[in-house]
Image (cartoon, rainbow, N blue to C red):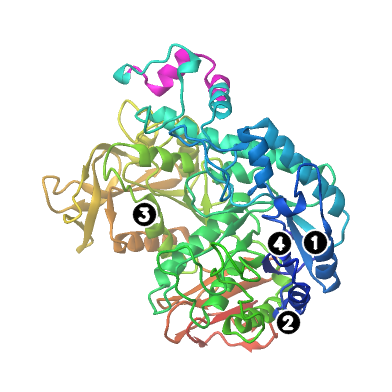
Amino acid sequence: MKKDIICPDFPHILHGGDYNPDQWSDCPDVLEEDMRLMKLSGCNTMTVGIFSWAKLEPSEGVFDFSFLDKTFDDVYRNGGRIILATPSGARPAWLSQKYPEVLRTFSDRRTALHGKRHNHCYTSPLYLEKTAIINGKLAERYGKHPALIMWHLSNEYGGECHCALCREAFRNWLKAKYGSLDNLNKQWWTSFWAHTYTDWSQIEPPSHIGEDCVHGLTLDWKRFVTHQTADFMRHEIESVRKYTPDIPVTTNLMGFYQGLDYREISKYIDVVSWDNYPSWKGDGSDIDLASEIACVHDLNRSLKHKPFMMMESTPSCVNWKPFNKLKRPGQHMLSSLQAIAHGSDTVQYFQWRKSRGCSEKFHGAVVDHVGNENTRVFREVSELGKRLSKLDQIVGTQTVAKAAILYDWSNQWALDDANAFCKDNKKLLPTLNNFYRPLWKRGINTDIIGFEDNFDKYSLIIAPMIYMVDGRLEKKIADFVETGGTFLATYVFGLVNENDLCHLGGTPCGSLKKVFGIISEETDTLYPDESNKVTMDDKTFTAVDLCDLIHAETADVLANYSSDFYTGMPAFTVNRYGKGKAYFIAFRDKGDFADTVVSKLLSECHITSDFDGELPYGMTAHSRTDGDSIYVFLENFSSSELSTSSKFNWTKVEDGSAVTGSKINLKPYETLILKR
């Protein structure tokens, strides 16, 4: 198995963070101290230039790269490398003042003033031109510098613009997609409430002061925003690739952020990276949160099915949440190694040194305002740096998964927009996590895949609340099951097509009625204080929120409802189709039923953890491999010491010492990195 190393010329775990020497350009003693502290902390990579445009181009056409010249040379001289950002996320004031077309317009058609960040128009030809100039200058100047290992495109792309340029671009995008107004009207079902369009110029993006009831319009607008953001990003890529064709590019994503379809965005970057800021409590109650964060790591790894980057995290606390709690001792080590366990080849921070002023002056950092190494946080970062320096053999290794969970941004957008069920909170992501958690706690490597991914590599695919099913997905599911796969779907499955039009002829749609052997007649929405009961194998489970009322045709009934007017109706079924099985869960549960079902399916599919041992609650084990060796990260997310065993004997990656599988103890928040 070939390793996929992010930077082949620097094959180490990248450890470092966002570095802003431009904020300290009048403090040479601080900059000199930064170099000493970087070496002391074991940080080997700095990300620079993210918000430096005003420093780099203080007035139009006047450039000053002196602070970056020094930074590149200093970092490289001290054994480090540079990730260089394009500065498009925060333009200088002179640009906004002279060229107001670059300012973003809100959905109520108000234009933003200059300020904050990420508030530019992605369509503006002028802004595209100005970003291409500054990006090109940076690429030309530093493209051959030995410190440069990667481009960081802008920062956390997001938001939308409703200016005249964007509205016209949206109409052109729709023309290319639908070809004619007649087809658009048909696909959007605009005869509803007499919303039929008779001229392209009548189409406006959704807004609370205008149209927001045509679901096809809302869905396509969200897709267009992704398209336009990706188009802007491609322009940025072109402007740096002209001078640096071999330097990889990334941009930092934000987990399950709903503003963009990250599967589409990830097509154009070389490496996926994301910003990880969980709200750890440190009181022993973080196990479910650890599972949720692991799921996001798996999502980012699955976007390109190769190692990713944890581009931002904090070694202490953030400053933008309602409650900004410090990480407890040991949590930084644990949460950082969790990222490596799930496929990251970096641990990076926002930020290296705390800003002295403005909105992020109290955001956590490696170097606090005290400015030296004599802090708890610095010591923990340094200790992590020592461990990461011993993990070179893991860099570029792959994660092999036989289980996958299906997730799609368009599906969530459409489901969230539906005036149905629990109208304002469909709970798709909590439902996804209810199915992910049983996999995570058993140490099962899991991919979070999209509709376009290859299903053939998996034995088990779980599809929570896949409301939107088009013809291609319908066929992929049928083929997967027919050729021997096990597929688990849930309530509100296959109700609409790719344009958010309801399927006719019953659900699940089309041939999936035969695949699952059921027909879903209607869905009951329960009030928050209500529940139903489900009985399976003499055990009773609680149904909450949503209950599909289904009829079994060829499916075998494995569980039934036991209260309300649908007492006795199927609640859980399985249908044999071809060589495989299609399971259907008709209700939302509190997690215990999902756990029971996932355990059953893992056994049937012969899917086990590479650790191959019983894992007590709070301990998990996930693996990476180079094809010859297996590396397992055994982690304790509880506040108590835990013990386990494995049928294998192992060696510790960091020092090569033997670990007998008969009994392995882990202290609270401890991670053991094993190899066999």
The answer to which of marks 4 and 2 sits earlier in the sequence is 2
Q: Which residue is mark 1?
A: 67
The answer to which of marks 1 and 2 sits earlier in the sequence is 2
Element assignment for label 2: helix
- Marks 3 and 1, how far apart in space? 49 Å
- Marks 4 and 2, how far apart in space? 18 Å
Left or right: where 465 falls relative to 535: right
Residue 272, x across and y down, in percent: 64, 53
- Marks 2 and 3, how far apart in space? 44 Å
Q: Is residue 56 above or below residue 46?
A: above
Q: State the residue at coordinates (37%, 40%).
A: 415
- Marks 1 and 2, how far apart in space? 23 Å
Q: Which residues are magenta?
A: 173-191
Q: State the residue at coordinates (40%, 47%).
A: 581
Q: Which residue is mark 2?
A: 40
Res. 20 mark = none
Left or right: where 516 falls relative to 662: left
Q: Which is closer to the viewer, label 1 or label 4?
A: 1
Is residue 363 highlighted in magenta?
no
* Residue 454 can be seen, yes or no: no
Q: Which is closer to the viewer, label 2 or label 3?
A: 2
Q: Which residue is mark 4?
A: 47
Residue 152, x across and y down, in percent: 70, 53
